Amino acid sequence: MLEHYGKSKRIRQPGQILICTLVLLMPAAMRAFSPPIQPTPLINSRYQTLLNKAENPASQNEPRKYRKKQKKTRNEIQFDLNEQLEKLTNLSYGPLHSNGQASIEREVFQSFNSNIYNAIWSSRTVTDVYKVLFQFVNTARDIIHKSVGPSVVDKTSKTVIKDLQIIGPNIAAAALRRVIDLRPDLNGRIGSDQDVQIAKKLIPSLLQIVAREVVHAESEQIKMRQFQNDEFYSFNNLVMSMNQLVGSSSASDDIVDIGMTHVSNANFMHSLAKVKLLQKKKGRYNDEATLKPLIQKTCLNIKQNNQGVVAFVKRLNPTLLSEALSSLATFGMKDESELLATIGDRLKQGDATGKLNSRQLSLGLWTFASLERPHLGIMKSFSRRLRKANIRHELDSGDISKAIWSIGQLMKQIDMIAETEIHSTQNLFTDEDVAAAREDSAIMVFTLSGELLQPKNKNRPDVLKLHSLGMNQIADILESFVFFEFDSNHAIFEAISEHISDHLLKGRHLQPAILARILRSFQRLRVNFDEERLSLIVTHFIEELESNGGKMCDGKSLTIIMRSMTMLSPDHNKSHPYFFETISNLLHDEGYLESLNEFECSNVMWCFAIANQYDKSLIKLLSIRMRKEDILSTLTPSSTSRYLWSFTKLVEGNRMDLEMKEILYEMFQGLGGILLSAQLTPVDSSSAMWAMAKSSYSLDMGIFDHLSEVLAVPFMLERATIQQISEATWACGKMHAYEDPLRELTLTGEVTEAPYVSRAEIFASYLATECDKMSTKDISQTIWSMGRMQICISDDKFSPLISKALFMAQNEMFNSQELANIIWALSKTDFENEAIISCFTQEICEPWILETTTPQEAANVLYALGKMHIRDKKTFDCMNSVLMGSLDKATSQTIANALWAHDCVNLVPPRQLFDSWAKEKLDIVGIYIDNQQVQVIEENE
């Protein structure tokens, strides 16, 4: 048997065989020195029923199905250890038989091996673990000395640490895990705790023993080194030397049985993950360059052992499998898809899920989410389990946050896989499975969000679980709420808003990146953010910017915060002008401005445009930045469209600034070519078309034709909003004014219709099918555009638009401008239904409408009635009263339109129209009655 044992351990010398035999057996003797704890899966099956704590008489009163098996007392365990030690000693002195005593030796070895694990797991302190190992090593020395002579043992050693290598990797892995799980205060002051001193020496030595076995290194290839008390973290240098061995190993080398059990591999992975977290907390070492190769090699060994991953998963219980998952996530082991999938397939089973506690369930979801390996079975099983009352009540706020964030990320990842039609080799995401997972996930999120509103302590009902969440955790759960389209009226949003306010009122710091995530989620959820709380956030953010000069706020966070605040505020943040002044001062810093990319520059301009903050110097700086080479090389159609739209909105709102109009034209010429792309979204096309039309930029009509062509595709129309299609239709009507049929007839001998006219008809046809979603503005500007391009409104496919307009007029929903535009448009398309026209004219004659009607609107109504030869005296009188009341604001064209209309229907215009206009002005009336020259009212927004 010993010969067989020696071969399995790759030991060639008889002395080494005996040494390793004794080393494996002696650790059990140390069980007597440590108080027992609850058994773990590492204990041999023969000893799984042993108890590590004294009997609990109270357990006799528990129901039968909850009663645990009685465990041995500490004295009984000590007696067993002594008995095994005696048997081991007798075997070490007697002859080694290959047949007769083989079964006896095997039984002694197996029992002793189990007892050493029991002794390690029952240890309550790091000192107890050290005592177990100390007894093991010293007893082994004595037996080896008696059996093979003193030359084998180094008697000069004063410490057990140097000789720990004789315990073997499996016991070392168990001891390493136990020491780390005891969580000694390794960051405490030197000399303050005996456990700390021992741990700083013991952890590196145990790590080396297991790591050497993992990388298939011989003991003499890696030299043991002593560690000073304050050098616990210096074991990184030791691990790096082992990584060299890993790197030098060829993938084609034959894999030799390294002698580590699956449980030991799991323990080692768990220990490495805990050590990495210690390093990360300390913040002094690059753990990715030291520990990750070890866990990679461990995974490789698991896969290449007999039966591979299947055997590994089969031999571990759910708790160890859950820990293995979290270890893989700690090191970002995304490539271990087979291992992750196999573990997931096991843990999704009901008998496995039921054995995991609430924290392990949330951590399991987090593992698959962080590694971007969605597993539908895990999502279904874990989310349903977490919804149960007895489980969710055990969750603390951190676990709830982790579970909510994870399930949202997993569903996003599944959607991304479905969109790109890339399916995982182990999971085929059918539509039915995805729909079921989405439903289970949404229910879990809703249930756990309610749990956050529960009191953390029954004695303090005012302190909720939510109040324990940090701002980063708040941002996490809000992002999941966005994905699942959470109801913005849910009570949790009020609680979160109050929690954020309390955080700021206490003077606590809120990082801009986290604030950006929170505000973006609120904005996407359309939560009604309290103005007082928004002002508090604005004030805090301004103070942060001014205190550090914007150094702590990157461009991405800045633009997200600006955009979200602008959208959340009812007045688009106009009530906080100092906010925009602070941003402007920050952007006037050349270094900071140069750090912004094209996306960020365009969003800054968009925020200023929405809030109508006309900062001329900032616009110039942003325009210069947008034409820099590094921006142009990465500029996207989306950013180009957003920038041009924002620039146009700001400049057109200040019509007298000719200098800025010139710069705007230069921007169109410099950036317009980027819009000739197939990678346009509906908002890109619509915004760019509106900007070209609003700014009257008609030098590159090919760009406008391309934009209209892209948007007219059915797929794009279905993705677009009604407002976007409506504005694109208006833009087509506006651009039609720049067409010159006379010049085209002179140059080519024929007149061809502009390409965008047919696409505008497509836009209008689509809007007619969605007219129930249209606002009065959408209806008005769509009909106006059709009139501008002389698209036949009488066509049956457009009848829903007229019906919708008629309904709005009868319900007094239009304003004067919208009514005037509709009446004018009907006249341009020879609309002949006077009854419908009469509904619109009656509405515009209502007193409350007349109060806001402008001379230009009145003149256009009169012009339309004159063109249609409708002799509506009441409407003429009402429109004349409007003109008479504001003659000083009327233009020559306005007067001309009114006079011409009176003449068309044989009505005498008011004498004041002639008296207020000099005869030399009236001589040019005929010029203005041409259809191409008539000025009409346009929608400015």
Image (cartoon, grey):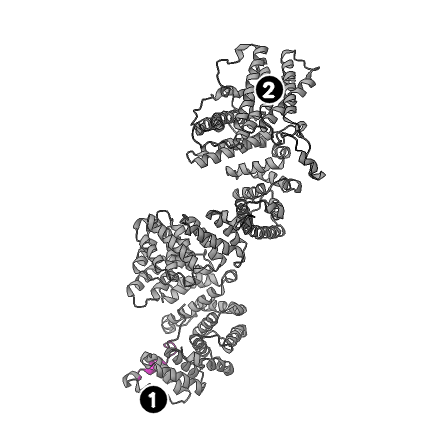
For label 2, the crowd category at 10 Å Cα-Cα, with few meaning under 14, some 14 to 19 and many 20 or more, is: many
Tag in front: 2 or 1: 2
Residue 623 showing in the rendered view: yes
Residue receiving disc 2: 26
Viewer-side residue, 74 vs 164 = 74
Residue 493 lies, in percent from the top left, at 50, 55
Viewer-side residue, 453 vs 275 = 453
On-image quarter of the N terminus = top right
Compared with 302, 403 (above or below) is below
Give the residue type at disc 1.
Answer: Arg
Could you give the CA–CA distance between mark 2 and mark 1, rounded to whole angstroms?
Answer: 122 Å
Viewer-side residue, 43 vs 340 = 43
**Residue 931 falls within the magenta-colored stretch:** yes
The quarter holding residue 351 reads top right
Q: Is residue 368 left or right of residue 228?
A: right
On-image quarter of the C terminus = bottom left
Majority SS type along the magenta span: loop
Q: Is residue 154 left or right of residue 110?
A: left
For label 1, the crowd category at 10 Å Cα-Cα, with few meaning under 14, some 14 to 19 and many 20 or more, is: few
Please give the label number shown on residue 911.
Answer: 1
The magenta region covers: 922-935
Give the residue type at disc 2.
Answer: Met
The quarter holding residue 929 reads bottom left
Viewer-side residue, 191 vs 399 = 191
- Count of numbered badges drawn on the protein: 2
Nearer the N terminus, badge 2 or badge 1?
2
The local secondary structure at tag 2 comes to helix
**Residue 702 falls within the magenta-colored stretch:** no
